């Protein structure tokens, strides 16, 4: 099947208490690896790219690669643009064929976040594309968006409800204590806050900063209503470490297949672990 919107995929996840893993990919091999992982586990999948990766590879290349993967696979696959602050780039990605986009206007005052998100909603709705928006601020570094730990701000549950009503957004990323990158200690996830938000807002919620969250904490967050988990940093590390190991052993290696194949396998194994934590194995057919 072609790549599909993430809207129904995530609504089903929320309804059935699992999460869909959303993996940030930077190369064709990483894309193939996460597709192989999800296919083997019969799980729905969201392939994500950051703004930086869209600039690096091009939106059309990413859409074509994801489309080939989706057409060859039996699982539902969506292609999502992660953390975008630029209206024009969102339009470019929707035009290229992205089926899901994140407008991150969380750095603006609340009313501006509502206005910017609503503007994106209007266009995306017409194109049948899902929109994810963010409330509060997730700490850490994501591409060129840097949020100091002290500036990270948790989302207010009542404000989440108001925001969803005002914007009509169908997927929400509330900041609940996770951070981008790798945690120095354990993350301080505010589970009570997740519970309160999930009780007020019935749309799928997104867990950002899914790299390095202890397994039990991921499961708890998913059980409370997190329906999408973003994983970026950990995949990059697995991919790069596998390549480094090949060059440590053979510094003169010059056949990309010799280091890309193990790197792809490392990403696949990690993606399978994350899909396991999300509880989405065997849920590929839930959409049909
Ligand atoms: Zn994020």
Image (spheres, rainbow, N blue to C red):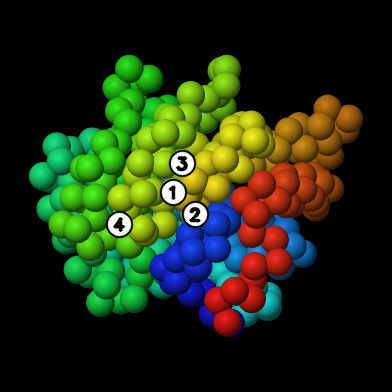
Q: Position of residue 287 (x, y in %)?
A: 55, 76
Q: Is mark 3 within 8 Å of ligand 1?
A: yes
Q: Residue drawn at (35%, 70%), measured in percent from left and top?
A: 129
Q: Which mark is residue 227?
A: 2
Q: Earlier in the sequence, mark 4 or mark 2?
A: 4
216, 181: nearer the viewer:
216
Q: Residue at x 40, y 64 (%)?
A: 100
Q: Is mark 1 within 8 Å of ligand 1?
A: no
The residue most toward the right is: 249
In contact (CB < 8 Å): disc 4 and disc 3: no
Q: Is 174 left or right of 54, judged from the image as shown?
A: left
Q: Residues within 10 Å of mark 3 (few under 14, many from 20)?
A: many
Residue 221 appears in view: yes
Residue 147 image point, x, y percent? 34, 27
Which residue lies under the disc numbered 4?
A: 89
Near mark 4 (Cα within 10 A), the count class, few <14, some 14-19 or many ≥20, is some
Residue 276 pos. (x, y %): 70, 51
Number of the front mark, 4 or 3: 3
Of 55 and 75, the residue lying toward us: 75
Residue sitting at x 64%, y 31%: 214
* C-alpha separation, residue under disc 1 versus residue under disc 4: 22 Å
Please give the residue where the numbered disc 1 appears in the rendered image.
206
Residue at the disc numbered 3: 208
Single out the mark in the foreground, 1 or 4: 1
């Amino acid at each position: 099947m072609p790549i599909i919107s993430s809207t129904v995929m995530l609504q089903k996840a929320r309804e059935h208490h699992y999460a869909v893993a959303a993996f940030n990919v930077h190369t064709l091999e990483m894309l193939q690896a996460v597709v192989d992982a999800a296919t083997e586990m019969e799980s729905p999948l969201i392939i994500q790219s950051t703004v930086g990766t869209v600039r690096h590879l091009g939106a059309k290349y990413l859409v074509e690669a994801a489309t080939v993967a989706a057409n060859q696979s039996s699982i539902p696959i969506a292609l999502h643009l992660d953390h975008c602050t630029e209206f024009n780039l969102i339009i470019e990605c929707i035009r290229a064929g992205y089926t899901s986009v994140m407008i991150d206007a969380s750095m603006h005052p609340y009313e501006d976040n509502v206005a910017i998100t609503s503007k994106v909603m209007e266009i995306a709705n017409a194109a049948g594309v899902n929109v994810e928006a963010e409330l509060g601020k997730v700490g850490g570094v994501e591409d060129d968006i840097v949020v100091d730990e002290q500036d990270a701000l948790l989302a207010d549950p009542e404000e989440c409800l108001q925001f969803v009503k005002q914007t009509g957004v169908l997927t929400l990323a509330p900041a609940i204590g996770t951070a981008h990158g790798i945690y120095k200690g354990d993350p301080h996830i505010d589970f009570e806050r997740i519970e309160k938000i999930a009780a007020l807002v019935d749309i799928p919620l997104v867990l950002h900063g899914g790299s390095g969250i202890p397994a039990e904490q991921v499961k708890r967050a998913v059980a409370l209503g997190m329906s999408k988990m973003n994983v970026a940093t950990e995949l990059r590390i697995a991919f790069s470490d596998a390549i480094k190991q090949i060059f440590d052993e053979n510094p003169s290696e010059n056949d990309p297949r010799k280091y890309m194949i193990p790197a792809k396998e490392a990403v696949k194994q990690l993606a399978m672990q994350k899909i396991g934590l999300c509880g989405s194995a065997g849920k590929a057919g839930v959409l049909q």
